[in-house]
Image (cartoon, rainbow, N blue to C red):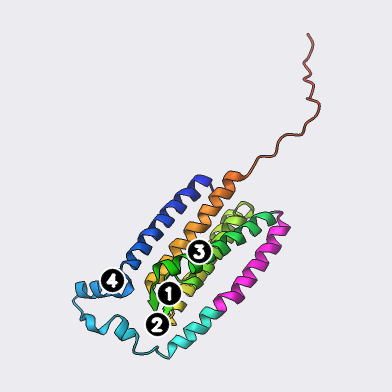
Amino acid sequence: MSRSRLAVIALVSLGATAVLCFAVSRGFNAFRLERHATSILGRPTHDFGPPFWGAGRPPSAELWGRLADVLATPVIAVVLVACLIFGAFKRVLWRVVTGIGFAALAFVINDDVVKPLVHQKFYGELSFPSGNVTIVCATALAMWIALYPVLGRWSRIITFMIGAGWTLVMSLAVVGAFWHTPLDVIGALLLSVGVVTAGAAVFEANKTTPAPPVGRQPVRVTAGV
């Protein structure tokens, strides 16, 4: 993937993340947006929002929570081990290790920077953006970018779809478990894509082309007349 494309994706994603963070911190959270949407649709707004969600989680929430737990640490560990082994076999282990660093950075920024700054709470916990979605999306994208040069055309498509599916199911799980709102998921997706692609763009820019070996220059032989 070209450095310029990565840079454009990073700028758009991080810019959208900043705008969304500002909006949520100023009160335009999922609850308020939901009220506006239901008003436009002509449905009563008193059945929605925090009073409705605060009435208690449905029984299915526990099942969604268990699924989210499985999709987080256990699956991430399996993916990282598989990518490390494959990267070592293909001699791009350094790219995989660097990608892991970018994914970890996205998670740290999510939990230690953005969440405290926005200070959006859901069921009494800081929720924006979703840490689970951030680490899954960042891991899937970072590993895909790291292995991109050694994957064939169809392998790239298949692995991208697997990563997108993993991220989608995790997004559904955290919302179904009532851990996060859909807006928390959107913020997590934007943040993780922005951080990973920004890191990849910088990484690609800093790659150096190996210099030709120093030695005697080849002697040009020309045919005599």
Residue drawn where x is 22% and y is 80% of the image: 45
* Residue depicted at x 23% and y 75%: 38
Amino acid at circle 4: Leu
Q: Which residue is mark 4?
A: 33
Q: Earlier in the sequence, mark 3 or mark 1?
A: 3
- Determine whether label 4 and label 1 are within 8 Å by CB: no
- The kind of residue on which mark 2 rests is Tyr
* N-term mark: 4 or 1: 4
Whole-number angstrom distance, CA of label 3 to CA of label 4 = 25 Å
For residue 156, which quarter of the picture? bottom right
> Which label's residue is closer to the chain start, 3 or 4?
4
Badge 3 amino acid: Ile
Instruction: Give how far apart the Cα atoms at labels 3 and 2 are.
Output: 22 Å
State the SS at label 3: helix
**Disc 2 target residue:** 123
* Residues at marks 3 and 1, CA–CA distance in whole angstroms: 14 Å
What's drawn in magenta, residue-wise? 70-91
For label 1, the residue is: 127
